[in-house]
């Protein structure tokens, strides 16, 4: 896959993460579930859709990578917000967590993609 196409797909994924977070949190409130579980499941679904449409690997590999990346990204985003690096700009650390989750997810997708490319050679 060309780098321009990957950058475009990552940009779309980043935008989807940013726009879907409030919707997933609202859904979690209506369902009265833990917001972290709702976000994790929602991001896993976004990752599965991305992996099937963008990467087109085997189904099992798509699902395993999607769920693992969603869980790891959400965990690291929460740990990143605990550092309190941007308290002046984001006092409640909500935007920091959303952006960190999206960035970590994209980084992990690129790592998985590079590993997959290296294995295929």
Image (cartoon, rainbow, N blue to C red):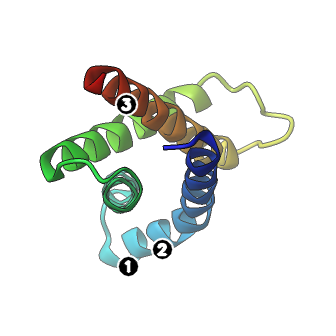
Mark 2 and mark 1: span between their CA atoms?
Answer: 6 Å
Tell me whether the residue at label 2 lies in contact with that at label 1, contact meaning CB atoms closer than 8 angstroms: yes
Q: How many residues crowd mark 2 within 10 Å: few (<14), some (14–19), many (20+)?
A: some
Q: Is residue 79 left or right of residue 68?
A: right
Q: Which numbered tag is attached to residue 49?
A: none
Q: Vertically, is 87 above or below 58?
A: above
Helix, strand or loop under label 3: helix
Q: At x 51% / y 73%, what residue is drawn? A: 23
- Which residue, given by chain and number where applicable, does mark 1 sit on? 30
| Towards the viewer: 36 or 98 | 98
Q: At x 53% / y 62%, what residue is drawn? A: 21
Helix, strand or loop under label 1: helix
Q: How many residues crowd mark 3 within 10 Å: few (<14), some (14–19), many (20+)?
A: some
Screen quadrant of the C terminus:
top left
Mark 1 and mark 3: span between their CA atoms?
Answer: 34 Å
Mark 3 and mark 2: span between their CA atoms?
Answer: 31 Å
Q: Residue furthest front?
A: 121
| Towards the viewer: 101 or 86 | 101
Q: Residue furthest right?
A: 88
> What is the quadrant of residue 68 in the picture?
top left
Q: At x 18% / y 48%, what residue is drawn? A: 58
> What is the quadrant of residue 92 in the picture?
top right
Q: Is residue 103 left or right of residue 70?
A: right
- Which residue, given by chain and number where applicable, does mark 3 sit on? 112
x, y percent for residue 71? 33, 40
Q: Vertically, is 19 above or below 120?
A: below
- Which residue, given by chain and number where applicable, does mark 2 sit on? 26
């Amino acid at each position: 896959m060309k780098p321009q196409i990957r950058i475009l797909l990552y940009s779309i994924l980043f935008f989807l993460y940013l726009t879907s977070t409030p919707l997933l949190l609202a859904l979690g409130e209506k369902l009265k579930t833990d917001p972290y579980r709702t976000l994790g499941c929602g991001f896993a679904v976004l990752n599965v859709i991305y992996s099937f449409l963008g990467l087109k690997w085997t189904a099992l590999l798509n699902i395993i990578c999607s769920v693992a990346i969603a869980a790891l990204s959400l965990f690291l985003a929460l740990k990143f917000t605990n550092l309190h690096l941007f308290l002046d700009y984001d006092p409640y650390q909500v935007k920091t967590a959303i952006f960190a989750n999206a960035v970590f997810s994209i980084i992990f997708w690129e790592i998985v993609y590079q590993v997959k490319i290296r294995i295929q050679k």
